[in-house]
Structure formats: structure tokens, C-alpha cells
Amino acid sequence: MVDPILQVRDLHTHFFADEGVVRAVDGTSFDLYPGRTLGIVGESGCGKSVTARSILRIVERPGRIVSGQILLRRGDGSQIDLAAQSPDSAEMRTIRGGEIGLVFQEPMSSLSAFHTVGNQIIEAVRLHSKLSKKAARDRAIELLAMVGIPRPAQRVDAYSFELSGGLRQRVMIALALAAEPGILIADEPTTALDVTTQAQILDLIRRLQQERQLAVILITHDMGVIAEMADDVVVMYLGKEVEKGPVDTIFHAPRHPYTRSLLRSIPSVLARPRDRLATIAGSIPHPFARPKGCPFHPRCPDFMPGTCDRDFPKEVAIADRHSTACHLYAS
Amino acid sequence: MLTYLARRLVLALITTWAITVVTFIIMQLPPGDFVDAYVSQSSAMGSSISAAEADAMRQAYGLNQPFYIQYLKWMSFVARGELGLSFEYGRPVTEVIGDRLWLTIILSIGAILVTWGLALPIGIYSAVRQYSFGDYVFTFVGFIGLAIPNFLLALIIMYVGFRYFGLNVGGLFSAEYALAPWSFAKVWDLMEHLPIPVFILALAGTAQLVRIMRANLLDELRRPYVMTARARGLPEYRVILKYPVRAALNPFASTIGYLLPFMVSGSVIISVVLSLPTVGPLLLRSLLSQDMLLGSSIILLLGILTVIGTLLSDMLLMWIDPRIRLGRDT
């Protein structure tokens, strides 16, 4: 296998609020390869989005990266640790958009209503290249055509509120790829869309990935999307990485009780009428009241008193590239 | 877009008409009329006016006719641009208001420009650096500015300006130009007098607008489109100035509507303190002496200024907000 384009090593991003410290991302590590998709999955508030923002260094105050490394391999083969850069540096700005593109969950409010979509795409194109205005406009039309927007030459002058949700998300993808980055981070790209549009957007991401050997980080809470799109999966719970491995292993031989619970709660077409959908007991703890030990223990079906509520479990390798952090598997 | 404009224009006309009616009613509200005021004034000065004389005056001015006739008469004059005679000054109202109107408008526009020039950058700074030392300083100064009555501020600034800087305070003209016909020298004299009143008038609105701008911008800064702009690799100042500031200007533009009349009516006391030859003090005097035609003309003028201001802000909104321009809301 080729070298990873992005390596995240033991990343910790904490938010320092007046009420206390929220450890939004608390020790995440993964590798991202060109042409492959890494799925990050978990419930709301488990630190998926903060992980994405940490990589781009756009975590908002009072949050900041406390420790860890984010190693990006660049076009010339050199490696740069994004966690060590200043968020406002020129270096970071060329990487944002230029080498890593980001697509957000909210296609409705992620575009400015005061500027045409063309204006925003042209801005992104010219920011990372030396194209003239005219050439950048042609490029914007090309990008809109690439993401499958009909009549791109007219739509370039449209405002976002004149487009449907699906078209807006396509514009967002065009915007993220305007400077031809090698990495695309899609943060819940289909959550706000209806199911048919979801499938189209996922197809589009997959097609673009194949065409340009994009490395994709797909953040979602939808196990169905993961099954369809991801090559590798990271399961997160309360900022902790609880299990990671190839997608087949995660779906067919999940080890961590949390992963198993997540998989059980997928609605099935085989279910009989009036069967209740399995849910995970309890709810996510308040961020300031994180349980001691393994954060999942209050909701865990395999809770072992005296062990799980005392120490956080170490990561255990189950097989090649498959590991989990759970006391059940501690040797 | 044309429907939007047309609707605004029709609404403006209807509003203007409604204002004329309300103006007229307001002028009729105080007990008694100009003649009563005149009679009591005269008797206070020692000369008495008989009831017959008073009735004759009422006859002459048409004050004993029914309400709607008086209104229609007044309107027919107003429509022809004749605002009638001021009872008190014995001169046409247009002449009495005359230059004062232009001076008021110059003063107001100057004050609005200074207000914006101060409030916009301070508001942006306070929002972007929320809870920073600078933000607290501006908030503190702003609240003090809001709490101190402006006429008091005017007095203090006048005193300091006169005592320590030898500035020419009070009025808009030096004595030798006050009654002189317009000339280059007189305009220059006006320019020299403008800064202090403009500054004091502007301070009245600045503190408030800073708070509005700060709150607007804080709302906008949390929107996802700011994050996407940042994720594109834009430098921070361009992210802020191009996107959220642009969006925060929207409510700003709609404040112009009432800023215009506020500058005229809200500055009455300041104008009296600074003895500015503007419309404000004139309105006060006409109301005190029940000089009906003069007072109603000024109130009418204020109303029309409000309508024009609102119309202007509507057009400005249309210009800066494509959602309105294209007739859609999201």
C-alpha cells in the first residue's frame, strides 16, 4: 500500500469553557490513504466534527489542540505537522482549501446568501492559483459541470437560495475541490438532504474520488452511509476512539460493545412489523460530567464493575489494522 | 423587483397622506387655539384684547370653521407648496423654515456619517474580539455615553472647547455672517463651526449603533458560511469583512429610516443648548406658542422625512440584499 497522505497521531482538542474543560477530541489516531475513504462514525457530540476542524485548524475559541500530531504529506514528498502550525499562518491558509477541502453538513447556511455561487467559487479558485478573473470564471463553470449541475454557465450567477438543497451541496463540493486538494473532508454531507439526493451526492463523491484519487474523510452518524462508502472505519465515543478497522471487519466482526450497539440500531428491511428498533440504553453524558474510566460504561451491556469504571482501557490489536479499546479484550 | 419598488412607493404615498391627517389632528389637540394663546400673551404684557377682537381674529384665520374644512383648506395650500403664514413671525412658513431646513439636513447627514464612521469599525472590533480588553473598554465608554444626557455632554464639550481650546462654540455662524447673504466666506465659516455640533449629535447615536452592530455581527459570526469561508483558506480579515459584516449590515441599513427624523427631532435640546439655527428649536417654539401653521408644517416635514428615509433604506436593502432584489425569502 502507498504511504498515507495524512496521519493523525494521538490528537487531543479541548475546549476551555468557564464551567470546565470539554475534552471534545481525546486521543484519536488514524491514517488516511489516497483513493480511499475513511469513515468516522459516532453519535452527536462525540468529537467527529471537531476532529475535522482540528485538521484544518479552524477550531473555534475556546477550543484548541492540546497535544498530538497531524502529519500531512505534501505534493513534493515533504511532511508537515499541522498541529504545530499557527492557525493564521500563510502556510495553513494554502493548505486550507488548497490541499484539504471541506464540505459541511448544512448546505442551506454554508453558502453566503449575499454573493453568487460563482463569486464564492471564483474567490476560492483565485486564492489558490494565479488565474485571471476570466479564466477563474471559466474554471468555476467547469467545476459546476463537474459536480453535475445542469446549465452551469447560467447557474454560476445564481444565488444559493435559488438552488435546491441537493444542488447547494453540489456547489459546496465544487467549492471544496476548487483548488484541487488531495484530501476531501465531508462532515455529514448528506444529513440535511432527502434520501434520493443523499444517494446522488454519495455517488458524486465516489466518482470524484475515483477520478482524482482523492483521500476522503467521511464523517457521519449513519452506519448505512459508512457501509456504502468507507474503506476503513473509526468509531468514536465522547472524543475517544473505541474501535477502528476495515469496513468489512467492523460490520461483520465488531468487537467493542458500542460498535455492536450501533450496528444493532440500524433499521432492517427484514424486521417484522411492530418489532421495536434496538436502541442504545441511556443517553450521551453531559460533556462536563464524563464518566470515569471507560466513558461508555454506564450504557454498556457488558459493563464489568470495578474495571470499566476505574481505568480507560488501552487499545488492543485484534487483527492486522483492527483494534479496539475495551477491557473485554485486555490480555 | 419592480413590484417591490411599486409597492413601497404606493405605501409611501398612503403613509404621507395619513401623516397629514395625524399632523392636523395633533395641532388641534391642545385646548384653545392660537388666538387664546395670543390673548393671554397680550394680557400678560398689559394690553387687553376684547372678545369681539378675538372673534374677529378667529374669523380672519378661519379658526371657527369645522375641523374637516380647516383640514381641506390647509391641504389645498400644502399641495400648492404654500404652507401659509406663521402667526407668530408674521412671515410665510416657508421663509421661516427656509435655510434652517438645509442647515438641519447638512448637520444631520454629517452626524450620520460620523456615527457610521465610528460605530461600524468599533462594532466590528467589539464583535470579533468579544470579551477582549478593547471590547470591555468600548462597552464601558458606550454605556457611559448612553447614560449621559446629550445636552449635558454638549455643555461639557462647549465649556472645554471654549475654555481650553479657544474654540468658537455655539451657533453655526460667526456674528458677522449670521445674517449675511450666502458667499464663499460664509460657507467656510459654516465649515469651521460644523465639527462640534456634528460630533455631539453623532455621539448620541454612536453608542447605540455600536451595540447593534456588535450584536448583529456576533450572530453572523456563528453561522456555518463563516466557517466554510475560513475552510477555503481566506485570510481572516477577508472572511470577516466579506461575509458576516456584509450580512450584519442588513439591519443597519434599515435603521436609516428613523435616523433621519431622529436627527431633526431628537436634537432639539442639543440645538437649543448649542444655539443652532436648525428646525428643532423652531418646532419647540411653535408648539409653545400654538403657532399652528408653522408647527404643523414642521411636523409634516418630519413625517415626510421619515417616509423618505424609510424609502431610502428600503432601496438600500434591495441593493445590498439579493434575496429582496430577487423577490424571495429564505
Image (tube, rainbow, N blue to C red):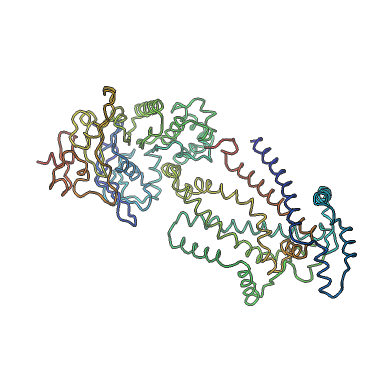
Q: Residue A124 appears at what percent x and percent y?
A: 46, 39
Say above or below: A199 vs A219. above
Say above or below: A301 vs B115. above
Residue placed furthest toward the left: A331
Horizontal relation, residue B210 to residue B67: left or right: left
Horizontal relation, residue B145 to residue A197: left or right: right
Given residues A142 and B78, the one toward you in this image is B78
Given residues A219 and B262, the one toward you in this image is B262
Q: Residue at x 83, y 48 (%)?
A: B76
Q: Residue B49 appears at what percent x and percent y?
A: 87, 69
Q: Quadrant of residue B10?
A: top right
Say above or below: A144 vs B323. above
Quadrant (top left/top right/bottom left/bottom right) for the N terminus of chain B: top right
Q: Residue B271 appears at what percent x and percent y?
A: 69, 66
Q: Residue at x 63, y 54 (%)?
A: B259
Residue placed furthest toward the front: B51
Q: Residue at x 70, y 52 (%)?
A: B305
Q: Residue B303 appears at what percent x and percent y?
A: 71, 52
